[in-house]
Amino acid sequence: MADKKANRYPYFAAETSAEVVIARIGADVDPRFREVMTAVIRHLHALVKEVRLTDDEWMAAIQFLTKTGQMCSDWRQEFILLSDTLGVSMLVDTLNHSHSETTENTVLGPFYVANPPHYENGRNICLDGKGEPMVVRGRVTDTSGAPIVGATVDAWQTNEDGFYDVQQKGVQPEMNLRGVFTTNDRGEYWFRSAKPRWYPIPGDGPVGAMLAAMGRSNIRPAHVHFIVRAAGYDDVVTHVFPPDCPYLDTDAVFGVKESLIGDFQRSEDKAEADRLGFPAPFWTLNWDFALAKAR
Amino acid sequence: MADKKANRYPYFAAETSAEVVIARIGADVDPRFREVMTAVIRHLHALVKEVRLTDDEWMAAIQFLTKTGQMCSDWRQEFILLSDTLGVSMLVDTLNHSHSETTENTVLGPFYVANPPHYENGRNICLDGKGEPMVVRGRVTDTSGAPIVGATVDAWQTNEDGFYDVQQKGVQPEMNLRGVFTTNDRGEYWFRSAKPRWYPIPGDGPVGAMLAAMGRSNIRPAHVHFIVRAAGYDDVVTHVFPPDCPYLDTDAVFGVKESLIGDFQRSEDKAEADRLGFPAPFWTLNWDFALAKAR
């Protein structure tokens, strides 16, 4: 026992708390797991000390995390919502997907669905006829501006009521406002849709309560989601936002980047509207995507 | 729009990510909540940047936290177990309950039950007759060593199989190895029990998997829990550990403090054993508690 009494190290003390916990990590542990857990433990302990977390605050944190997990289901991922609203999802995305010469990425979000319909260019994906009509046109290129033929442009968005089709099963037509388009031999794609609308993220769980307590908005600004893919290139997962949306500066999940604010134009051109099969006025969005060679 | 284009601040960028999120906290927010959330956001973002968390690691973290929440029930608190095993519970306890002149605190743990039975001094709380018999004797004093009369000493522990009664409902007698004793006019308490045993914390959930991946033990060293209360004094919530337990240095929840290792002595004294109603050999623990005036 003499050695043990001389060495307080293995026992807990506030001053060395993180080191005591880290020293317990075994010798044969995956080096990356060790690196991540070491950083997790250091930051957790530094946080608790910095704010001198009280017993009651600790219990409130335990209850918050428990409720957040218990709110999750096949249709709801409250921990992703927590990560999104604390800016963590955007940070992870930005650290892992930053090309200076390509279209910028932003968060995927929880409303992408597998196997969306593939359409000929020009198809109108707005199946419920709501909202202001919009035509989207552009090119997919490499970082030198050369066209990429056969790239796919996978788009999805909410309807005019602010809901994705999967949030309103039985109310909206299936696959409303979703479609995949393929670039032609000049790298061009185009489709018709409706101008996107802002919407609130789910507010009935612990994350909604947290945002309210933080005095924060739960609104996402209007946007169209895109995943652009081409063989031999890295995917671009992004949004395009209309510049007139009043919620650009307060996106609840921090998805807005200045480079992703699109050139949305309102048009009164009746002849063009007729050609598109739209009433006037309608909206145009011209948007090109630049993809980087796969790393 | 000119102003907005000149000012990238409201939009997300990796370099200023924490500041962007913190800047969104409203003006009329509770100052303490602002302080805590600001520190949470700073540490979360610093952690993600420091380890350059990948997309897959982020998703693994989301799934881990989700499972941890979903494992919680009325009988299981996996987030408290996570906090315990990362040393956070001990840190919060140590920051909030450090008196230099009193018995040191340690974690309460999840197995305390409300309304334990009150007994006369001397009662044997080991109702299943298992394990090596033990007698515990001591005094409750103030920090000057003056006895406190009428203090309550609330004790609980596992049985010889390593389970608390509430973990084995229908197997162990109800309220096995739990009891509250009151100090006499010399500040003394005493009771009979069994020598405590080490035990594994629940290993079938995400926290068990985390400990295994970290190459860590899931064993808690043997201990008797105590809550000592007296009117006008701060409670002491603590454990006492036997010095011969082989798991003192690797407590899965970091509850061991050197000052809490007790004077457990093995006795062959047949006459004393007869007086106690024990077979020989038996164990003795002499343990005094010092309480501080309520702050």
Image (cartoon, coloured by chain):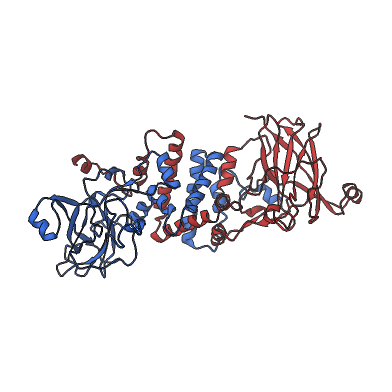
Chain colours: A blue, B red
In this view, the residue in front, A99 or B173, is B173
Q: Choose top left, top right, bottom left or bottom right for residue A177.
A: bottom left
Farthest front residue in view = A170
Q: Is residue A251 left or right of residue A185?
A: right
Q: Kindly identify the residue that appears in the image at 39 percent across and 55 percent down.
A: B52
Q: Which image quadrant for residue A119?
A: bottom left
- Residue B97 appears at what percent x and percent y? 61, 37
Identify which residue is drawn at 21% across, 42% down.
Answer: B6
Residue at 10%, 50% (x, y): give it. A268
* Quadrant holding the C terminus of chain A: bottom left
Q: Is residue B40 above or below residue A35?
A: above
The front one of A190 and A23 is A190
- Residue B189, compared with residue A280, is above or below; it is above
Q: x%, y% of residue B237?
A: 66, 41
Left or right of B145 in this view: B6: left
Tell whether A163 sits left or right of B245. left
